[in-house]
């Protein structure tokens, strides 16, 4: 859904690519029953992203028992059908406004992905799946939004509470704790949204249901946000 095709380089992810829309997309949820538990967990990186972009999805997730949608094998029911439908619809509604990412609208779909791509790159795409990296990116970038006073403390707490509802920190690869936040942040200079070296542009949450592009984010603030992420992972709370 969306039409993006791309390849990864050693320096960064998705640097070379194009847009090619499919003729047809079939979403048969019965295939999800065949996935291992790790892949179900990976999917929640993107689902949590859409919950921050679309408050209707957030409300569904925050009010629902985890077991109803986050168990193994994947439960195919009316609730999960609605959840997946809303995620796809949210993306399509945004893509229709800015198919080739030239108007600054589609870029809000990159929420969580700027730091996620840096984490994937620095670990040579071997330590973290994309979904796992996006979860890390959502935590760090939400903290970044709070740090620059773009996101309120209350809204930040709501986002972290949602993530911790579905993410057991014991399942997170500890590799990132051994990396220097500075080294991860340096890779963001390769991100397609970066305007100039060490002055970055991020898709950040303003509140649940509102995500906007924010420019002129300084390098040191990104480093601080990655350090917060590392601290968050190392805390044995919030399971």
Image (cartoon, helix red, strand yellow):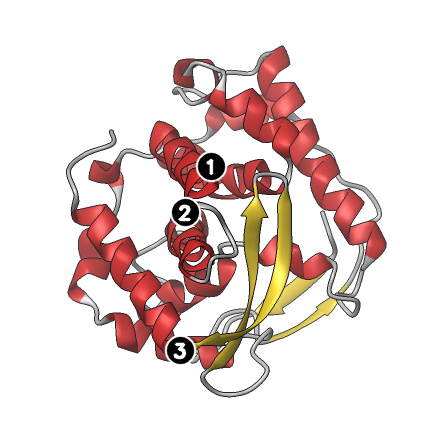
Say left or right for 98 vs 83: right
Q: Quadrant of the C terminus?
A: top left
Residue 135's label in the rendered image is: 2
Residue 121 picture quarter: bottom left
Q: Pointer 1: what residue?
A: 44
Residue 219's label in the rendered image is: 3
Helix, strand or loop for disc 1 = helix
Of circles 1 and 3, which is in front? 3
Q: Report if the CB atoms under discs 2 and 1 are less than 8 Å apart.
A: yes
Label 2 neighbour load within 10 Å: few <14, some 14-19, many 20+: many
The one nearer the camera, 87 or 60, is 60
- Residue 135 visible from this viewpoint: yes
Q: Report if the CB atoms under discs 1 and 3 are less than 8 Å apart.
A: no
Tell me which numbered mark, 2 or 1, is placed earlier along the sequence: 1
- Quote the CA–CA distance across marks 2 and 3: 21 Å
Of circles 2 and 3, which is in front? 3
Residue 83 picture quarter: top right
Query: How far from the left and from the top, in percent, is residue 212?
Result: 64, 57
């Amino acid at each position: 859904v969306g039409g993006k095709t791309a390849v990864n380089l050693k320096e960064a992810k998705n640097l070379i690519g194009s847009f090619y829309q499919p003729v047809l997309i079939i979403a048969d949820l019965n295939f999800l029953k065949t996935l291992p538990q790790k892949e179900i967990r990976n999917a929640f990186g993107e689902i949590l992203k859409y919950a921050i972009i679309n408050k209707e999805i957030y409300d569904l997730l925050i009010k629902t028992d985890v077991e109803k949608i986050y168990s193994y094998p994947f439960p195919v029911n009316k609730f999960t059908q609605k959840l997946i439908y809303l995620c796809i619809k949210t993306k399509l509604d945004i893509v229709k406004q800015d198919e080739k990412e030239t108007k600054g609208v589609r870029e809000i779909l990159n929420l969580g992905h700027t730091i996620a791509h840096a984490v994937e790159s620095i670990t040579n795409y071997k330590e973290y799946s994309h979904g796992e990296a996006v979860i890390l990116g959502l935590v760090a970038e939400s903290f970044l939004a709070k740090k620059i006073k773009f996101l309120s403390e209350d809204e930040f707490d709501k986002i972290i509470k949602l993530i911790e509802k579905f993410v057991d920190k014991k399942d997170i690869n500890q590799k990132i704790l051994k990396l220097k936040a500075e080294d991860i942040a340096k890779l963001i200079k390769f991100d397609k949204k970066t305007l100039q070296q060490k002055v970055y542009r991020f898709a950040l949450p303003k509140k649940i249901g509102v995500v906007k592009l924010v420019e002129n984010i300084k390098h040191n603030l990104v480093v601080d946000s990655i350090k917060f992420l590392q601290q968050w992972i190392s805390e044995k709370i919030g399971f």
